[in-house]
Amino acid sequence: MENQSKLLKKEYTNWLRRKKKADGQPYSEGTVMQYVSALSTSPAKLSTIKLETTNVFEIADASQYSSMREAMKQAENFNLVNERAGNKAFQYSLDYYEEFLRGRESGLGSEVASSKLSENSIATEGASMGNAENKLLLDKNTILYGPPGTGKTYHTVLYAVSMIERKPVIAILQEAETDGYDQIKRRFEAYKANGQIAFTTFHQSYGYEEFIEGIKPKLVSDDNTDTVTGEIGYEIVPGVFKRFCDEAQKPIVQASNDYGIRKEPTIWKVSLWGSKENPVKRDCFNNNRIRIGWDSYGEIVNEETDYSQFGGRMIISRFINEMRSGDIVLVLYDEETIDAIGVVTGDYEWLEDVDTFKRSRDVKWLVKDIRENIMELNENTVMTQGSVYRLNRISLSDVLTILQRQKTGHVSSAIQSNNNNYVFIIDEINRGNISKIFGELITLIEPTKRIGMPEEIMLKLPYSQDLFGVPNNVYLLATMNSADRSIARLDTALRRRFSFAEMMPDPSTLASIVVNGELLNIAKMLEALNKRIEVLYDREHTIGHAYFFELYKEPTLEKLGHLFEHTIIPLLQEYFYDNYEKIRLVLSDNNKLDPEQFIARNKVIVNELFGILDEHDLEDHFTYKINGAAFSQIEAYRKIYDHNSLA
């Protein structure tokens, strides 16, 4: 048994080394070792469960292991053990080991099994789609992280399309390779235009008010007197993420429906000659219309109309100019209750054949003569006697719920629940103050706490007092520059709730170019630069391959020089805090002739500079300056990776 477990552990380790991440790159050796270590040591740390063995490598049968894996996930301290393993290494390694075992049993080679059963590094539970090997989709919350220039923005487009279309990332990556990135980008832009993708960038002054909701000033108007007072008031305004979540929950109105409901209907409250039962209301119910008064102003009202005696200017304007065909009206019964719901189907009309309340619009009644209390939906606010105004607190979802409760299920053919996926992209997530921005949302974004999930949580927002939760069809996709801030220093609460997909430099994506008739191996050059940076600094501050892509459009010495002078060297200056000796080592300037060195070094003899220094102990010093002439010499670049290169 011991020999078998050692063999399985070794085979699993090699399987992980061959396994490819979402971007097609293999896992780093450190990540492989982290996964193997987590699977080796973490089971013994689990409490409140009884396992037949804590050495999972003793289990070679996939079905037997699957039961054991589910038991381990039920441990009371599973999340704590998983967190301490780092980057959810225990959770992922548990899943990957089952994939490995099933690959062995299927007769597939380890490498093939890896690509068939788990095509990306952050796959979780699959959606119901096609074959088993295609069921692996992305986590609800994902951070793409890595050094600058490693294609995080590029992959954001691919990941977002993958999430919306419910396809594995590897399928979108392969599609981009075969059909081109541009057609994926076009779909991304179409989803964005449709409101399914939104984007924001975190920064140090970004806060809860911009992200969730805040209070902003506005000019006050008085609905009762129909005048703008000129005073400054304040209104609660939803932030970019709350608006996005609200949009993701909106029912979808079919483009052509039998009821005439438009895509984004406004919900109006309408009083038909006041409350309760009355002749005007009964006429409207019988003749499919709504009517309001102020007949003394005549059929046509304009800027010259004098409203000073009877008022009504804003109400008439709403009824005639702002209400649109396809909007929904709720008819007042009393201050808490409505007795009808209809869809506006016609423009403003003046009725000559009635004595009063001559202003009219055609309506298709969805339900009438009902009694539906909407106080709770209206946030415990009573409806006023004002004839026409927007019910901003009541959504189309609320109206659909009322209609379904009134057994008008046929309306569901026109208004359907929103099952589309939505992706909210956060650029530079590590640059923001996470506690300040997310507030209580940090709990709500957990997949198990989403709306509709078994552990659903809805919280009252501090300003509006609205109940708010994160819909299950919303994905959070973020990017993080690991050179800007280490993941180890990232907010712990955020780390627990996000999966991480590493994006590292990939020299294999680069090919040699011919510059001025000379062959230059860009892949070897980048590889040499990054190996030196890892030794002198760390792997988080390496240089991304994407910086060099423009060279293939314009393979000239001028373009190459511009890249090094204005991007690569400034980046190294930032990394090494102007330690020019280390920068020279990265650029291999210590192996070049003086004219080929990007950073020229000049020794300063302090006695020559200062003269007699009896009372001062100064050592000879070096000064550095960027050698502009080197940028136009091909050997300056070739000797970065080939010390023995000859001109």
Image (cartoon, grey):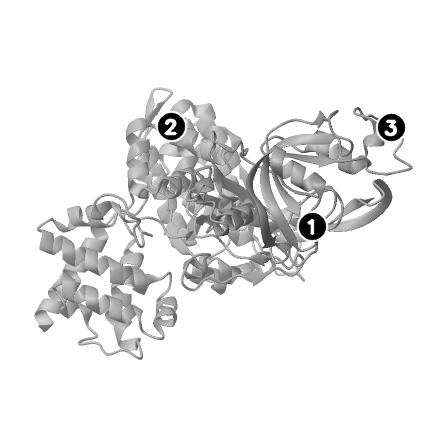
Sequence order check: which comes first, mark 1 or mark 2? 2
10 Å neighbourhood of mark 1: few (<14), some, or many (≥20)?
A: some
Judge depth for marks 3 and 2 and give the one in front. Answer: 3
Sequence order check: which comes first, mark 1 or mark 3? 1
Instruction: Tell me the quadrant of the picture where the N terminus can be found.
Output: bottom left
Residue 227 image point, x, y percent: 85, 40
Q: Secondary structure at mark 3?
A: loop
Q: Spatial distance from mark 1 to mark 3, Cα to Cα?
A: 31 Å
Whether residue 304 is visible to the viewer of this picture, yes or no, is yes
Q: Are marks 3 and 2 in contact (CB under 8 Å)?
A: no
Q: Spatial distance from mark 3 to mark 2, Cα to Cα?
A: 56 Å
For badge 3, the amino acid type reads Thr
- Quarter of the image for residue 416 reads top left
Q: Residue furthest right?
A: 309
Q: Nearer the viewer, residue 258 or 2?
A: 258
Q: Which mark is residue 276?
A: 1
10 Å neighbourhood of mark 3: few (<14), some, or many (≥20)?
A: few
Q: Spatial distance from mark 1 to mark 2, Cα to Cα?
A: 58 Å
Q: Which mark is residue 183?
A: 2
Judge depth for marks 1 and 3 and give the one in front. Answer: 1
Residue 142 image point, x, y percent: 42, 51
Q: Which residue is mark 3?
A: 305
